[in-house]
Image (cartoon, grey):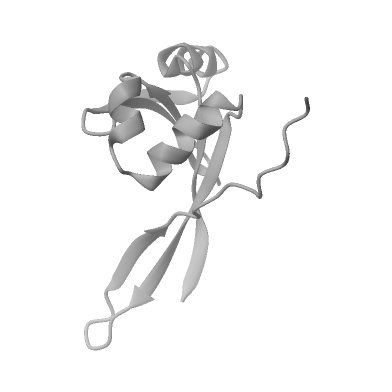
């Protein structure tokens, strides 16, 4: 099995503004999509040798809080704590016997890092 970097997820209040800033630096950035069942939306930037960066924003906080998606639940909690960098997403390929075709699957860690106590 081969494991490789797939993409980096970064929480931002306005993905479209980050997209425009990266375009001004000459990078290719696009509007991603809306995820109504998760309450989120995103923009993407494709970078050579890195795959891509995903800027994700919350469009509907109530939906994001109750959607049941572990990554979005983490995003909401991290947002409340002021965190912005979310897990790195990895992928791996398995070769099926017989045809030699590769099957790609994404691996998403459940936590970006162990939680540290908040300073008071």
Q: Which of 38 and 68 is in front in this view?
A: 68
Query: Can I make out residue 53 in this image?
Result: no
Q: In which quarter of the image is residue 38?
A: top left
Residue 114, horizontal then vertical, whole percent: 66, 50
Query: Can I make out residue 23 in this image?
Result: yes
Q: Is 24 rendered above or below residue 120?
A: above
Residue 119, horizontal then vertical, whole percent: 78, 29
Q: Which of 98 and 87 is in front in this view?
A: 87
Residue depicted at x 50% and y 33%: 77
Residue depicted at x 58% and y 47%: 112
Residue 57, horizontal then vertical, whole percent: 41, 23
Residue 68, horizontal then vertical, whole percent: 30, 43
Instruction: Count every numbered label the image shows and give the total.
Output: 0
Q: In which quarter of the image is residue 87?
A: top right
Q: Which residue lies furthest to the front in this view?
A: 120
Q: Position of 26 compared to 32: left or right?
A: right
Q: Which residue lies furthest to the bottom in this view?
A: 98
Residue depicted at x 58% and y 29%: 84
Q: Position of 111 compared to 100: left or right?
A: right
Which quadrant of the rendered structure holds the C terminus? Answer: top right
Q: In which quarter of the image is residue 71?
A: top left
């Amino acid at each position: 099995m081969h494991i490789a970097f797939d993409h980096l997820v970064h929480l931002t209040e306005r993905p479209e503004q980050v997209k425009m800033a990266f375009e001004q630096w000459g990078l290719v950035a696009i509007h991603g999509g809306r995820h109504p069942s998760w309450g989120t939306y995103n923009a993407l930037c494709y970078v050579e040798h890195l795959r891509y960066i995903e800027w994700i924003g919350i469009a509907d906080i109530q939906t994001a809080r109750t959607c049941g998606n572990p990554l979005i639940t983490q995003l909401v909690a991290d947002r409340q704590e002021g965190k912005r960098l979310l897990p790195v997403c990895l992928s791996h390929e398995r070769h099926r016997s017989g045809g030699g075709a590769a099957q790609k699957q994404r691996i998403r860690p459940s936590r970006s890092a162990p939680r540290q106590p908040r300073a008071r």
